[in-house]
Image: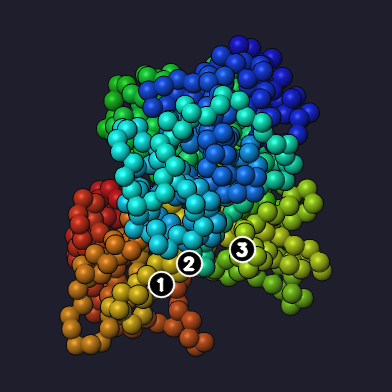
Amino acid sequence: MSNDLTIQRTAEAVESPLVINSILESGVRNAPEQEIVYADQRRMSYRDLEERVNRLAGALAECGVKPGDTVAVMDWDTHRYLEAFFAIPMMGAVLHTVNVRLSPEQILYTLNHAEDDVILVNREFLPVLEELKDRIETVKRYVLLDDEGGNLDSQLDIAGEYEALLQQAPAEFDFPELDENTRATTFYTTGTTGLPKAAPGSHRKFIMAYGGFGLMSLAMKPEDVLYCTLPLYHGTALLVCWGSVLAGGSAIALRRKFSASAFWDDVRYYHATTFGYVGELCRYLLNQPPSEQDRNHSLTKMIGNGLRPSIWKEFKQRFGIETVAELYASSEGNIGFSNFFNMDNTVGFSTAPYKLVKFHDGTRDPVRNEKGFMQEVAKGEPGLLIGEITKKWSFEGYTQKEATEKSILRNAFKKGDAWFNTGDVLKEIGCGHLQFVDRMGDTYRWKGENVSTTEVENIIDGSGMVEEAIVYGVEIPGSNGKAGMVTLVPHSNGQEFDVNRLFAYLRDNLPAYAVPVFVRITHAIEKTGTFKYRKVDIQKLGYSLRDGEEVYAWLPGTDGYTLLTPELVSEIDSGSVRF
């Protein structure tokens, strides 16, 4: 197939309403037999996908789903997720992508907050829902996603098994006409208030990602195959990777969970030309022993975020990658950057209006001058990224009005203006291109997930074992993101503090990625004259050792905390301990 088809799709996308329905309709009309999905030992063409989407919509309608309802999906990366992505928004309903790595309490919060009506759930996650069933408020029916077959015995009201329901449903479905501003998706992002925040996404927002990343950044073509191991409940996978595939009329190959050892074998098997990444994934691949097979593949492009400058060129050279479409975006934000010109060590540039401003160290709070206005940083200096909110660059924000308002900076440069506070620090490196520096405030990123320090602090406070606790992220040589660390003061009840009792409690109440990797036990936490924690000073200490304190680490392959010694600290500092 030639580039003419891609051009035709682009023209149709411009002429058609900015709704997800038009993408599938265009694919079926222009290339019905083009294979688009490789997953779960099956290959699906546009025609196959359309029929399954129609049947799923019919099955959901039988379950009572109607426009305006919300349907949650709790699954790994399977073909079912992509079918749900089309069927649910095309019905005028909202797709709620559930992060299955969250703790049960966090999952409960998102289900109730989203007011889900139906949940499509993988059998693996049934025990979690059965445990929560008496506290789930709005869900009426469940559909079991089950490859194994078997009985449907459950305490939940299960409408049936996915494949059986699809077979019973008609192959045609009459979808309603939709407006581009109709909500299509809800992603829950870890915020700074302690609980996940709901970031709604309209049909229009997806179409913008579809064109911006798939056509402009990657120039995807029908012969391309994008290999995706990122979880589809995250925007990078579902909006960026899937959107890029759809834009080019290409194909996506899914693996349920990332495997560094199987990665290149999969790439060769699917003849993949592109893959979706986060920085941690790239480091895992680099940590694999070098092999003569490192360049024996067809992969030339990659799209994602978080590739550190320290490994950027090494990754490209070792694996023969030609194009790194690094991007910067967020599910809730109004601004995005993309590396359109394939420059090294940059998130690229943006056509949206933005500024980099001075900020208070260790916070996401901008500095204001004596007139109350913000100040831009000098070129090349790190600054807090803010995006101007205009009619063209609207801020859809969160479903919680308070959280939305908290992210808006008003009267920044003149009376009446409004800007979205990303909470991230970037710097300009030339030609209008930016480089990511750090995430500020009350959130850090570890193992590809955002972690709320407030939430972890609240969980620790609930243990009954500490008087004070402050959580933050610290850098570890040889790893991406920041590892969680807590500095705490134990309860002075005369009993010896049991750090591994705390570890067991944290494992029961937090997802693994949110459990602090380091614990510093001290007698007092220093505060300012206004009784605020000196968080920046504490953070600068990292996991270094000081007299009168104990520091513990959750070392790889262990099931508890280990007391750090100078020798262990040296091993961690040298990068020989792989977290």
Q: Position of residue 561 (x, y in %)?
A: 22, 63
Q: Position of residue 141 (x, y in %)?
A: 47, 48
Q: CA distance from mark 1 to mark 2?
A: 8 Å
Kind of residue at badge 2: Gly
Q: Is residue 471 above or below residue 20?
A: below
**What residue sits 45% from the left and 20% below the top?**
43
Residue 79 showing in the rendered view: yes
- Mark 2: which secondary structure? loop
**What residue sits 63% from the left and 22% below the top?**
27
Mark 2 vs mark 3: give the one in front. Answer: 3
Q: Are marks 1 and 2 in contact (CB under 8 Å)?
A: yes
Badge 1 local density, few (<14 within 10 Å), some, or many (20+)? some
Badge 3 local density, few (<14 within 10 Å), some, or many (20+)? few
Q: Nearer the viewer, residue 324 or 5?
A: 5
Q: Is residue 538 left or right of residue 223?
A: left
Q: Quadrant of residue 199?
A: bottom right
Badge 2 local density, few (<14 within 10 Å), some, or many (20+)? some
Name the disc covering residue 458, or none. Answer: 1
Sequence-wise, the earlier of marks 2 and 3 is: 2
Q: Residue furthest right?
A: 415
Sequence-wise, the earlier of marks 1 and 2 is: 2
Q: Which residue is mark 3?
A: 400
Q: Position of residue 420 (x, y in %)?
A: 67, 59
Q: Which residue is mark 2?
A: 194
**What residue sits 49% from the left and 24% below the top?**
37
Kind of residue at badge 3: Gln
- Mark 1: which secondary structure? helix
Mark 1 vs mark 3: give the one in front. Answer: 3
Q: Quadrant of residue 55?
A: top right
- Mark 3: which secondary structure? loop
